[in-house]
């Protein structure tokens, strides 16, 4: 059943599979336990852990060179840490990479509940990255839209995951 009010881990995993993603490069965080459990138990998607978010884009590039189709999952604060990797590899090399960024602090209205939310969209716009807001299972198709944009523009594109992942 598709949720129009919540975002379930199973719907996200199904969309990643539908898009042909082979690997999910990720440092799990406190808000995404259900997604981690779904990915850990999924035979079609390989979970590639990292020690710091700043490593994720470089590891994804290595996977792409090896013929894989990775996606990177991180919080907005992890994206801030990954800025140099994103600039140097994602933008300068024209890496068509799908990023799923948890929108920590997003409340749907101002003011946000965490200052990290204040900076996220302005930073994405400054880098010229296409981004799409995913708030519920009804929106998970926007993950595929972000991947298509990444491929068409030959640069990273972002699915902003606006809600905590619920149980499958």
Image (tube, rainbow, N blue to C red):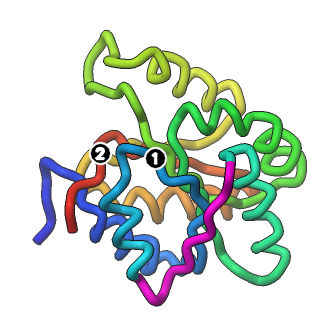
Q: Magenta residues, as a range?
A: 42-51
Residue 88 in which image quadrant: top right
Residue sitting farthest toward the top: 111
SS of the residue under disc 1: loop
Report the Cα–Cα distance between label 2 and label 1: 11 Å
Image x and y of residue 67, in percent: 77, 83
Q: Are marks 2 and 1 in contact (CB under 8 Å)?
A: no
Residue 121, label in figure = none
Task: Name the residue: 82% across, 81% down.
Answer: 66
Image x and y of residue 53, in percent: 66, 46
Is residue 26 covered in magenta? no
Q: Nearer the viewer, residue 15 or 30?
A: 30
Mark 2 or mark 1, whichever is nearer to me: 1
Task: Name the residue: 62% across, 69% down.
Answer: 48
Residue 96 in which image quadrant: bottom right
Task: Name the residue: 56% across, 62% down.
Answer: 147
Q: Which residue is mark 2?
A: 164
Image x and y of residue 38, in percent: 35, 72
Q: Earlier in the sequence, mark 2 or mark 1?
A: 1
Residue 29, label in figure = 1
Q: Is residue 73 above or below residue 31?
A: below
Determine crowd level at label 2: few under 14, some 14-19, many 20+ residues with C-alpha closer than 10 A: many
Quadrant of the frame with the N terminus: bottom left
As drawn, is 115 to the left or to the right of 140? right
Q: Main secondary structure of the magenta part?
A: loop
Task: Name the residue: 42% across, 73% down.
Answer: 39
């Amino acid at each position: 059943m598709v949720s129009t009010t919540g975002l379930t881990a199973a719907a996200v995993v199904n969309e990643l599979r539908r898009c042909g993603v082979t690997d999910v490069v990720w440092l799990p965080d406190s808000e995404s336990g259900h997604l981690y459990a779904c990915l850990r138990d999924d035979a079609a998607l390989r979970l590639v852990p990292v020690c710091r978010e700043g490593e994720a884009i470089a590891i994804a590039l290595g996977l792409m060179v090896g013929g894989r189709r990775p996606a990177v999952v991180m919080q907005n604060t992890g994206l801030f840490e990954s800025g140099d990797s994103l600039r140097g590899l994602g933008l300068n090399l024209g890496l068509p990479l799908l990023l799923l960024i948890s929108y920590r602090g997003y409340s749907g209205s101002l003011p946000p509940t965490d200052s990290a939310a204040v900076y996220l969209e302005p930073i994405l716009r400054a880098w010229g990255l296409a981004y799409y807001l995913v708030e519920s299972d009804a929106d998970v198709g926007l993950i595929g839209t972000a991947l298509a944009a990444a491929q068409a523009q030959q640069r990273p594109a972002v699915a902003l995951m606006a809600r905590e992942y619920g149980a499958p």
